[in-house]
Amino acid sequence: MLIKNALVISPADQIHEKYDVRCENGQIKELGGLAPLPAEEVLDAEGLVLVPGLCDTHVHFRDPGQTWKEDIHTGASAAAAGGFTSVVCMANTVPVTDSTEVLRDTLERAVWEKIRIYQAAAVSVGFKGIQLTDMEALKDAGAAGFTDDGIPLTDPDFVRRAMKEAARLHLPISLHEEDPALISENGINAGSAAAAALSLTGAPAAAEERLVERDCALALETGACVVIQHVSSGGSVDIIRKYKVLGANLHAEATPHHFSLTEDAVLQFGTNAKMNPPLRTEADRQKILEGLADGTLDLIATDHAPHAAEEKARPFTKAPSGIIGLETSLALAVTNLVKTGILSMDELVMKMAVNPRRLYGLCGGNIAPGEPADITLIDPDLVWTPEIYHSKSSNSPFPGMQLTGRAVFTVCGGRIIYSWI
């Protein structure tokens, strides 16, 4: 396949130039001013931006165990529609991905999908925060990293031991930072108008900041590669920045919902704006934007969390937390980060395609000969409105919202796996 006339942005290769790109046998063959070969498929990408395939390191495909919400196939379809060619799935499956048997089953089924699916394994057996999993065996079975995402680890000694083992194995450990001792009800910001309207106390920013401070200090002590997941608090941004300066091997996620919305969204969207950690104040959102701009937050990850409509229809305190995000992530980033001047397109590609792969040691992230032909073609000026999703679920505050920018073609292994046109 020959992709003609695209603006190629590959910051890892210091490329920001109009090129033709030839793909052959699943790899990028060459770049330049290229003429079509006989019988070669030609894709005219005039007006489009060609970047390394997007990579999301924080998704929930609910498979095994909760496949009425999502499964590997529908999750992969949603990812491709959002421009993602690689994802890392979290371990809060049913049963928990804390054994090599569950891990291998997922990975064996994932190879049949059109995107590259990686699986994180649990830090603790049964997500109970007491006994370490056999992290070495899980690494040997193909685990991309370790996380108990969804369940905070409250025992600092346990976290220290987990970090030391992750460091020994040279794999990242990702942490959900909310101290349950400080939270009355999750999913809603303490002190917000929404919490007051629902007569709830909610989850304060201090619950996140307390564990972020602890775990950044432990990261500095142990030398582990630590990921602070879905940062919601401006105070957390400051803490992470401080420990990065001190030399901790830290990475931190910003989600599209946390950089796009505030706590007031709960008044408009109800449980479709309920997530852990919750949406917070405009001041917190501005600090997240600042952290993205200065590199403190080096990853954009969706925390794609599908739930059935009837689950989200429950009363606020009974409804599950989380929203889907794979199909709107890029558009929210272009709309709220690139079009506003917070990030350049090159910087956005670093956070959505390059840094995620470097963190997990995944293939791709470059537009260069010999690299996998995993490519996202973006129309940065396309105005559209989310309506129907490829995901099995539709729990999102963004349907009906006018957004700018989207993936119009997704290519994985040299094959077009999604086309908007």
Image (cartoon, grey):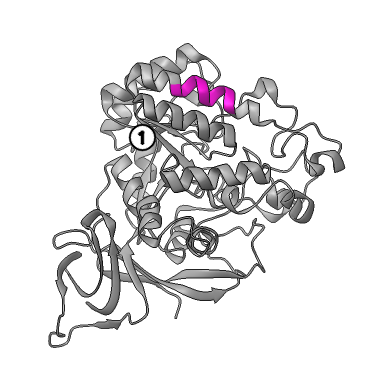
Left or right, 55 with respect to 279, comes to left
Where the C terminus falls, by quadrant? bottom left
Q: Report helix, strand or loop for mark 1.
A: loop
**Is 170 drawn above or below residue 62 in the view shown?**
above
Q: Residue 410 falls in which quadrant of the image? A: bottom left
The residue lying toward the viewer, choosing from 319 and 36, is: 36
Left or right, 270 with respect to 113, comes to right
Residue 314 coordinates in the image, percent (x, y): 78, 47
Residue depicted at x 35% and y 32%:
172
Q: Which residue is mark 1?
A: 145
Left or right, 211 with respect to 162, comes to right
Count of numbered badges drawn on the protein: 1
**Is 220 drawn above or below residue 404 in the view shown?**
above
Residue depicted at x 57% and y 54%:
324
Residue depicted at x 15% and y 81%:
34
Q: Give yes or no for residue 98 being in the magenta stretch.
A: no
- Magenta-highlighted residues: 209-216
The residue lying toward the viewer, choosing from 378 and 91, is: 378
Residue 145 coordinates in the image, percent (x, y): 36, 34
Residue 112 coordinates in the image, percent (x, y): 34, 57
What amino acid is found at the position of numbered circle 1 in the picture?
A: Gly
Residue 371 coordinates in the image, percent (x, y): 18, 58
